[in-house]
Amino acid sequence: MDKRATAMVTLLSAALPQEKFVLTETLSSVPNASFEVEGVVETCETSVMPLIWASAGDHDHLDTALLDDPTTEEVELLSDQADQWLYRMKWVNDVQGLLETLVTNQATILTATTSDGRWVVRLMFPTHDGVSETMAHCKEHDIDLEMIAIREMSGQPAGRYGLTDPQFVALTTAWKQGFYTVPRGVELVDVAADLGVSHQALSERLRRGIDALVQDTLMADDQPAEISR
């Protein structure tokens, strides 16, 4: 019997209103500012600090706003890349509690960005229980976490991107053989012959695969909440 864990990795896309989360006053006073979480650093057993890329028209204005923001306890500039800056921040207790819950549940922050007056995050949990515990924490502490989409990944590479196994094989084979290069390195009929399917079947499989790939990656934050197994 295979003793390896069979728990299903779960992807969660969710949104929080800016005014219900962090950096609200910064975003109000520096309206052209944008933020993207690079990761979360566990500084000790009870403390975590996010690493955040920030961009704005006026760095000094942004820096002052971050230091004055009531949701930050510590702000440290780690890197200056001319048009964007990497900060390490410690947030106030309510928000720290959410970050610590994510660390406890071994969640990985895939993306976290500010957009249209809200924070949009994509998280990966090793088990579905981690999602449940995180949502319970948010409810208990009145953190308005809106679930956008949730999907359980299979153990196969295709499952990471919402593809069926045949779609995954079709897309990767076509790409490897040069079907998507300019100029095209191979004709669709040749890829179909290698895969043992008809030209029409492969064409439809590629279209459906690309549609699923775009929905699951580029458009993931616009999808209604649902569970795919």
Image (tube, rainbow, N blue to C red):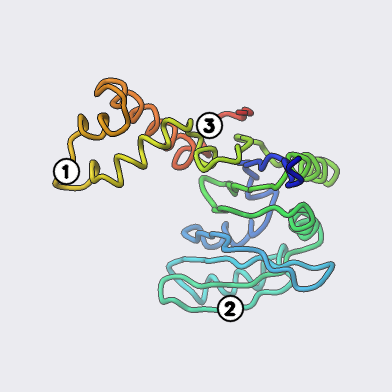
Please, what secondary structure does the residue beneath circle 1 have? loop
Q: Earlier in the sequence, mark 2 or mark 1?
A: 2
Using the image as rendered, state which of residue 100 and residue 125 is in the foreground: 125
Which of label 2 and label 1 is nearer to you?
Answer: 1
| Residue that lies at the very extreme toward the front in this rendered image | 1
Q: Position of residue 125 (x, y in %)?
A: 69, 47
Q: Name which residue lies at 77% across and 60% down.
A: 96
The crowd level at tag 3 (other Cα within 10 Å; few <14, some 14-19, many 20+) is some
Mark linked to residue 143: none
Check disc 3 and report the residue beneath it: 223
- Residue 77: assigned label: 2
Q: Nearer the viewer, mark 3 or mark 1?
A: 1
How packed mark 1 is, by other alpha carbons closer than 10 Å (few <14, some 14-19, many 20 or more), is: few
Residue on which the image places disc 1? 184
Q: Quadrant of the C terminus?
A: top right
Q: Residue at x 62, y 54 (%)?
A: 109
The answer for how far apart the CA atoms under marks 3 and 2 are is 35 Å
**Label total for image:** 3
Disc 2 residue type (three-letter): Leu
Q: Is residue 196 above or below residue 119?
A: above
* SS state under label 3: loop
